């Protein structure tokens, strides 16, 4: 009986066949049960040896049936893996079908480069919401209600007049101070929104990268060092930059940093408004009142902060002469930036 079973079980290739064999040998009317039934006609002596023998046989058959079921399941998985295999990158097949290829949008590509540079300098990456409260976007940044500086950024307000689309990434400074105790340094990249006239270098939705470092003895020298390192790593060369005094209520002193326009070499074009320099970022030493809003004692700690225009960085890096291309959704534009 076992020899016959072995031959049959060795040849099965489906789960249904295994079930049939199981019924044939181990079912109520199965072949093993027939043997067990016939034991009643055997002598007590014969029963003594045949009983344990048939039990042993039953266990052996059961375990081989289990093994066969596992083997078949595994074969079925292998078969499906082979037949349902998919090329998840799809790059080659898209190219073969003449459908072009995937690539990062230049804003994404530069964003990742900037994040990597800051991570290598020990900065954390923080995030914040697009919809902000008056408190985070203005008040905690030393811009109280009715302060004229509120008019520097044309704000999209919600009808409750307490919420708005953030006009800059600076609210991330306040959120960062709530989470971190000095010393700390972080950057916060993201989309910002302003209700303003659009031209070659101004959008109503654009990106900024906020940066903040707070600790004992942090000075303007640190600020200049980090910004210079960032710019030379992004452009793979020393950029010609100039630092001008700039007014932002949340820093004191405040500066604006411009770089020599790479599109016209400083001669003047539509992006730099014929002045030869592009406004890259605002920065300065964090105002003591802002540190206090973050529960940081300005007598013990100082810090710098900057907010950099991400779109303009991308434009300089790739020689893009109009900011509107970046969000045009025009495939002829984005397909020029390939991942390989
Ligand atoms: C600010 O938004 C400040 N929050 C920056 C700051 C942060 C100062 C921390 C001090 C400390 P400003 O409005 O100048 O500043 O914008 C910063 C940069 O964003 C500009 O230098 C420019 O590169 C970019 N930018 C501003 N407006 C636009 C726009 N409409 N389209 C594209 N880029 C813009």
Image (spheres, rainbow, N blue to C red):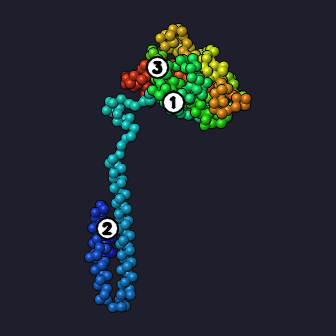
* Disc 1/disc 2 C-alpha distance (Å): 69 Å
Residue 200, compared with residue 99, is above or below; it is above
Is 25 in front, or is 180?
180
- Quarter in which the N terminus is drawn: bottom left
Q: Looking at the image, which residue is at 57% across and 17% down?
A: 148
Is 106 in front, or is 180?
180
Mark 1 burial class by Cα count in 10 Å: few <14, some 14-19, many 20+: some
Q: In the rendered structure, are the residues bearing label 1 and label 2 in contact, judged by CB atoms less than 8 Å apart? A: no
**Which numbered disc flags the more N-terminal residue, 1 or 2?**
2
Residue 277, compared with residue 123, is above or below; it is above
Q: Looking at the image, which residue is at 34% across and 49% down?
A: 82
Is 294 in front, or is 258?
294
**Which numbered disc flags the more N-terminal residue, 2 or 3?**
2
Dot 1 lies on which element? strand
Tell me where residue 314 appears, x and y as whole percent.
Answer: 49, 22
* Disc 2/disc 3 C-alpha distance (Å): 76 Å
- Quarter in which the C terminus is drawn: top left
Residue 6 seen in the figure:
yes
In the picture of the structure, the residue carrying the numbered disc 1 is: 132
Q: In the rendered structure, are the residues bearing label 1 and label 3 in contact, judged by CB atoms less than 8 Å apart? A: no
Dot 3 lies on which element? loop
Left or right: 77 in relation to 172? left
In the picture of the structure, the residue carrying the numbered disc 2 is: 9
Mark 2 burial class by Cα count in 10 Å: few <14, some 14-19, many 20+: some
* Disc 1/disc 3 C-alpha distance (Å): 15 Å
Residue 168, compared with residue 246, is above or below; it is below
Is 210 in front, or is 8?
210
Tell me where residue 136 appears, x and y as whole percent.
Answer: 56, 29
The reply to whether the residue tagged 3 has its Cβ within 8 angstroms of ligand 1 is: no
In the picture of the structure, the residue carrying the numbered disc 3 is: 195
Q: Looking at the image, which residue is at 28% across and 63% down?
A: 16
């Amino acid at each position: 009986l076992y020899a016959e079973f072995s031959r049959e079980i060795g040849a099965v290739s489906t789960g249904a066949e295994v079930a049939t064999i199981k019924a044939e040998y181990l079912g109520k009317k199965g072949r093993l049960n027939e043997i067990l039934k016939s034991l009643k006609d055997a002598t007590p002596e014969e029963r003594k040896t045949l009983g344990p023998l048939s039990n042993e046989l039953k266990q052996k058959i059961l375990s081989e049936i289990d093994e066969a079921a596992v083997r078949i399941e595994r074969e079925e998985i292998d078969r499906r893996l082979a037949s349902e295999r998919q090329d998840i990158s799809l790059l080659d097949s898209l190219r073969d079908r003449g459908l072009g290829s995937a690539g990062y949008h230049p804003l994404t590509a530069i964003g990742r480069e900037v994040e990597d540079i800051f991570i290598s300098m020990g900065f954390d990456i923080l995030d914040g919401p697009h919809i902000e409260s008056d408190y985070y976007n203005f008040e905690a940044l030393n811009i109280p209600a009715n302060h004229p500086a509120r008019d520097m950024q044309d704000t999209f307000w919600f009808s409750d007049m307490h919420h708005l689309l953030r006009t800059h990434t600076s609210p991330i400074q306040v959120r960062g101070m709530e989470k971190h105790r000095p010393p700390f340094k972080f950057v916060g990249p993201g989309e910002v929104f302003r209700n303003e006239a659009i031209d070659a270098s101004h959008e109503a939705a654009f990106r900024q990268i906020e940066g903040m470092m707070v600790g004992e003895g942090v000075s303007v020298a640190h600020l200049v060092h980090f910004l210079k390192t960032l710019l030379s790593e992004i452009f793979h060369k020393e950029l010609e930059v100039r630092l001008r005094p700039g007014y932002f209520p949340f820093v004191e002193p405040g500066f604006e940093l411009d770089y020599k326009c790479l599109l016209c070499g400083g001669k003047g074009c539509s992006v730099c408004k014929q002045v030869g320099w592009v406004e890259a970022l605002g920065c300065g030493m964090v105002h003591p009142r802002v540190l206090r809003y973050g529960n940081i004692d300005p007598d013990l700690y100082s810090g710098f902060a900057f907010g950099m225009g991400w779109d303009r960085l991308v434009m300089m890096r790739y020689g893009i002469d109009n900011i509107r291309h970046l969000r045009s959704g025009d495939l002829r534009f984005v397909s020029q930036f390939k991942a390989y």
